[in-house]
Image (tube, rainbow, N blue to C red):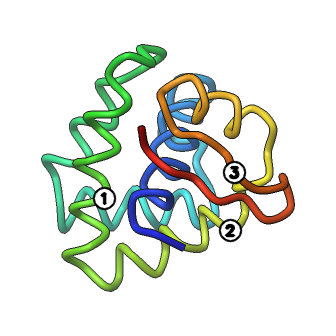
Amino acid sequence: MEPLTIAGIVTIVLTGALAKIGENALDGSLKQLSQLLKQKSPDTWKRITTVGDDQEALPEVIDVVATAIAKDEDIKKVAEEVAQENQSKPEVINIMKNVGIVNQGTINNPVFNFN
């Protein structure tokens, strides 16, 4: 999976989870990813936590997350897990379409391109 696609899914899932349930309720790979980002890329974590429900800010934050994924193998590994777990969720796909990421595959095997 492309780093930008992984970043898109991760950013959408993390910002949505933070907005709905808060940081203390994160678990599994989302919790692990949030901890890695706080430790290894605090600026990226700060950008994620400030997005909230502002979908207009997502493309810029997705780029920042993609950079963090590309620079660190630990972040990349956990981000790939989060993306795999969430790539077929309709709400993730809808938000990706809304922010300019076009799905050119099926829900079971999506391929995303940024316009």
Q: Which residue is mark 1?
A: 66
**Where does the C terminus fall, quadrant-wise?**
top left
Is residue 104 depicted above or below 50 in this figure?
Answer: below
Q: Which residue is mark 2?
A: 84
The amino acid type found where label 1 is placed reads: Ala
User: Which comes before the other along the chain, label 2 or label 3?
Assistant: 2
Q: Position of residue 11 (x, y in %)?
A: 45, 44
Instruction: Find residue 72 and report its image quarter.
Output: bottom left
Q: Position of residue 111 (x, y in %)?
A: 64, 59
**Where does the N terminus fall, quadrant-wise?**
bottom right
Q: Residue at x 49, y 74 (%)?
A: 78
Q: Which mark is residue 104?
A: 3
User: Which comes before the other along the chain, label 2 or label 1?
Assistant: 1
- Total marks shown come to 3
Q: Residue at x 84, y 55 (%)?
A: 106
Q: Nearer the viewer, residue 92 or 43?
A: 92
Q: Which residue of the protein is positioned furthest toward the bottom in this rendering?
A: 73
Whether residues under marks 2 and 3 lie with C-beta atoms below 8 angstroms apart, the answer is no
